Amino acid sequence: MQRQHTLGCAIILGTGLVFSLVAVGVMDHPASVQGSGRDLLRMDVALLLVYGIAGVVVWKQRAGTPNTAAAIVGAQIGLLLGAVLIANHLIKAFVPIRPFVLVISPVFVMLALLGTAGAAAWERTRSLVLGVTGGVCCAIVATLITLSFAISFNRFFAARVDWQLREAFAASGMIDPGGFRVRNILEASSEILVRVPLLAICSGFAGAVIHAWMSRESRRIAIAASILAALVFAVGGSALWHANAIERAARPPFVMSGVLLSGVALCAAYPVWCILCGSVKSAPRFSDQS
């Protein structure tokens, strides 16, 4: 089986697994889809259908084409991102009170990996559009891995999850704690199914654009860019640190600027590294064979 077929099949099977886990939870706790829960379920099903279609599209790609190269490199990085997000879920489950470093570090790693996926896809295809494709494939793989683990974890450690959600459950007015837990899963799933790919589009494009620019510059420019990226990252990190210390209502401007600055700096990490190490690859040649 060719690699694009393996990847496409994995995406389709991962989508089916997430859908099955959601369906089992809803059947066990029908109260979860009462009221607004029904809309959440519909949203999740629609989004998972889109993910499944993406898997079919990957499956139908021909071997040795730029599309396949971008999808595969993105998926490879997506495996690493999925592991990072699983680790973050475990930390949240077993370390309820976390220092700010543990809260923000997974976000930084995610931004860096999504930007790397876009830059690496551009490096192999010399296409900004396929750079975005690489970032999206990274997001799809990581999201399916994370949801499969998180929903399974919430099912097998239901008592612990219910205890962590006890205050929100008391304020919800629901009677069944299991139903509230499943509704929480539906809401979180709809958010991650949308937000991670959108973030991948932005980060993947940024990584591809920065790599396209840096590949034409000298090592001296790369050194200057690395210093500038470090300064931008420091400013963005400081904005996020400040946002964590002020009232919630005043946080949005600092959070948005902090994420933007930090994200751009982290998306530049792989391109700068390639220039400094002298490992920028020449434009590859793709065969038209299927």
Image (cartoon, grey):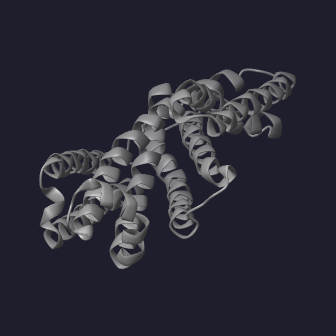
Residue at figure coordinates x 50%, y 30% from the top left = 249
Instruction: Return the x and y of residue 258 as percentages of the image width and height.
Output: 63, 30
From what the image shows, is residue 99 above or below residue 119? below
Residue at figure coordinates x 34%, y 41% from the top left = 194
Instruction: Return the x and y of residue 259 as percentages of the image width and height.
Output: 59, 32
Q: Quadrant of residue 262?
A: top right
Placement of the N terminus among the 4 image quadrants = bottom left
Residue at figure coordinates x 79%, y 28% from the top left = 231
* Count of residue discs: 0
Q: Quadrant of residue 280?
A: top right
Instruction: Return the x and y of residue 66 as percentages of the image width and height.
Output: 45, 37
Question: Of 227 and 32, which appears nearest the observer?
Answer: 32
Question: Of 154 and 242, which appears nearest the observer?
Answer: 242
Q: Could one spot residue 64 in this view of the protein?
A: no
Instruction: Return the x and y of residue 39 as percentages of the image width and height.
Output: 16, 46
Describe residue 261's horizontal placement relative to residue 86 as left or right.
Answer: right
Describe residue 19's horizontal placement relative to residue 145 as left or right.
Answer: left
Q: Could one spot residue 242 in this view of the protein?
A: yes
From what the image shows, is residue 264 above or below residue 176? above
Describe residue 186's horizontal placement relative to residue 33 as left or right.
Answer: right
